[in-house]
Amino acid sequence: MQKNIIETHQLDFSFGKFKVLHNLSLKVPQASIYGFLGPNGAGKTTTIRILLGLIKTTKGKVSLFNQDLNNHRVEILRKIGALVEMPSLYPHLSGRKNLEITRTLIGNIDKKRIDEVLEIVGLSNDAHRRVKQYSLGMKQRLGLALSFLNDPDLLILDEPTNGLDPNGIKEIRELIIRLNQEFQKTIFVSSHLLSEVEKVATHVGIIHQGKLHFEGSIGELREQQKPSTLLEVNDSDKAAEILTDQHIPIIGRQNGTLKIEAHEHAVIHQVNSSLLKAGLEVYQLSPQESSLEDLFMDITQNPR
């Protein structure tokens, strides 16, 4: 049976009267890359702050490494590395000096570890440059180096590609995959970009308005994709009435184009016949494979 590194049980959290999290229960498997996906304001950063013991839940339980966070906070946090929002760096010092300061603060870390993490994040040749001369992507990679300087078992990353250019995003993506596959780190990474999560994650949790709407492997998420058909007619309102009468779900609508939950040849033929019989002009009736982006929108806009 697969072991879970993170488990939360029915977490609630409120800022005053505003409820941010509602009964949030997560299970993050060991050695996974868990993509915590949701729109901005969905509750991702609040959840991460709870996992790191920075804020306390209104209700619920947090367990990491099979230990209760409230009872074993110090012991648990020693096994975690984190990058929340932009890394806190000393811009007037070199990348190496930033790592040396953190090594001293943590204690019990071999000096050779600095060279190891610099190599992993690809900053060995820039280690002696001042951080203020680094690009945003280099600063983010240095932030990641700081987060796993103590060789943690779990990395928690909050929107690590935010603000980066395509090359910087690719570098962080490849680094996350390497840390997982080569060094067996469990990685919990939040994002509002499904396209990025899809490229790195083995598992995903989708949060919207503080509620978890899906959790499972990327394969299980793909299994929920529904084939659909695009329908373009001269009168979409009248077409929608006909489809509703025939109990054919409309899952999307834009301008004069409807997306219907149907792909079987017989059903499409029936739809075409009904529309023509009603005097409508059918410009397009074409089967489509739904993308994960479509599925994400469906999950967040039409909660199951």
Image (cartoon, grey):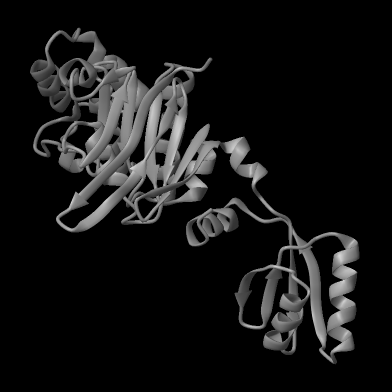
Q: Residue 252: x, y in percent? A: 62, 70
Residue 95 makes an appearance in the image: yes
Q: Nearer the viewer, residue 82 or 105?
A: 82
Q: Residue 283: x, y in percent? A: 80, 81
Horizontally, residue 222 falls left or right of residue 80, namely right
Horizontally, residue 223 falls left or right of residue 277, namely left
The structure residue drawn at horizontal position 61% and vertical position 82%, both measured from the top left corner, is: 255
Q: Quadrant of residue 152?
A: top left
Q: Residue 69: x, y in percent? A: 23, 24
Vertical relation: 86 (above or below) 16: above
**Residue most extreme to the bottom:** 279
Horizontally, residue 103 falls left or right of residue 27, namely left
Residue 135 makes an appearance in the image: no
Horizontally, residue 136 falls left or right of residue 183, namely left
The structure residue drawn at horizontal position 53% and vertical position 36%, both measured from the top left corner, is: 216
Q: Quadrant of residue 227?
A: bottom right
The structure residue drawn at horizontal position 13% and vertical position 20%, both measured from the top left corner, is: 100
